[in-house]
Image (cartoon, helix red, strand yellow):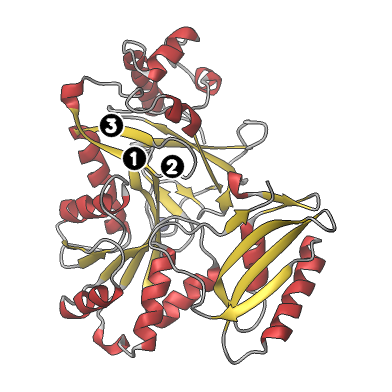
Amino acid sequence: MKLSDKQLKLVDAQIKRLIKTDSFYGKKYRELGITGCECEEDFKKLPFSSKDELRLAYPLGIQAVDDKDVVRIHSSSGTTGKPVIIPYTQKDVDDWATMFARCYETAGINKTDRIQITPGYGLWTAGIGFQAGCEKLGAMAVPMGPGNTEKQLQMMIDLKTTVIAATSSYALLLSEEITKRGLRDQIFLKKGVIGSERWSETMRQTIRRNLGISLYDIYGLTEIYGPGIGISCDEENGMHYWDDYIFIEIIDPVTGENVPDGESGEIVITTLVKEGAPLLRFRTHDLSRIIPGECKCGSKYPRLDIISGRSDDMFKIHGVNLFPSQIEAILGMVDGVGSEYRIILARDNDTKKDVLHITAEAEGRVDFAQTGMSLTKLCKSRLGVTPKIAIVPVGSLARSEKKTKRVDDQRS
Ligand code: ZN
């Protein structure tokens, strides 16, 4: 993907504005002698920005406007170390809502829809992004926030909500509850807008089967506005993203070099018009690829494939590099096995060897011992690793309203 002339001009303007400020990146670019970005080569020479740098700039070091121009902050969850704080100007907040409304439109959602918003409100960008986009579109927001399944189902029925906004894991939980309670004829849901964490095909099929709705993947991250910078369309062939607001390149996560369109790698994002905290060449650690060519839906916006994983989710066991998506693919191959799972990496102190533990859910109709053996065999033949597998009944593993952490490395 090459920058258009218009995008280059916007990047150039961002840099010229940044170096006049005392912000983290203003100082960094000044020190590196960066004065602008006139051509593709200049752009390729710009250093990457990263979440670690944003942590160094905590709390407001990346702010690139006067205090009087900041109207809001958001913060990304800090599972390790300091959180990251992102300041927004009024224009940033408006732009984000405009992008989000465009997402809803791409998913065929309009003013007559009622959108039940289950992601959390507050410091993180999820709930409020869904809300602002919904209001900008002119649809009716039902701002539930996470949890309280009883109330969620009651509102869904009484208010006849037509769209559910949720993480994949919470959408799965709601769909299971609706099925279990036989509420399917009382709900009016048509569409689900699902947060962009990586989720398996099995999970997608389960939600679809339980609710009979169309599902759309929405993409975004707090550092770059929040969810709403891209969404899948009815073609279900990747997510359109808004290249008038962001520029996306895909790099080899090890070498940092750009890969050709169509090849997988790490998503790197440049904000083109952000004011409060512009980021150039931000490494997301999300893995995907640019889908070349135009979409059959007719939209001219470029496409990213759905997120296949995180470059930092990769784990190494017995000398083999593995991604959770590879385990998911194997779970999807065995009859009766569900879509939720947990991976624990542990050290066996007696044998001095690492052990891969996988807990998977299966339907009550299948033989758990047999199922465990089938999974073990498949892991051995396809991944070259022999795990210890525990099978538990469907519904045993915790469902979360936030992104679920599925790999727990206890070896250190
Ligand atoms: Zn499309």
Mark 2 vs mark 3, CA separation in Å? 16 Å
Say which of 408 and 246 sits in front: 408
Among the 4 quarters of the image, the one containing residue 139: bottom left
Residue placed under numbered mark 2 in the picture: 78
Tell me residue 357's x, y (percent): 69, 65
Q: Earlier in the sequence, mark 2 or mark 3?
A: 2
- Label pair 1/2, CB-CB below 8 angstroms: yes
Residue 101 visible within the image: no
| Disc 2 residue: CB within 8 Å of ligand 1 | no
Q: Say if 326 sits above or below 176 in the image.
A: above
Q: Are marks 2 and 3 in contact (CB under 8 Å)?
A: no
Q: Earlier in the sequence, mark 1 or mark 3?
A: 1
Report the front residue among 271 and 150: 150
Inspect this view and state whether residue 215 appears.
yes
* Residue at mark 3: 87
Compared with 81, 383 (above or below) is below
Ligand 1 picture quarter: bottom left
- Horizontal side, residue 341 vs residue 333: left or right: left
> Which label number is shown at residue 75?
1
Marks 1 and 2, how far apart at CA: 9 Å
From the image, state whether disc 1 or disc 2 is nearer to you. 2
Vertical placement of residue 78 versus 180, above or below: above
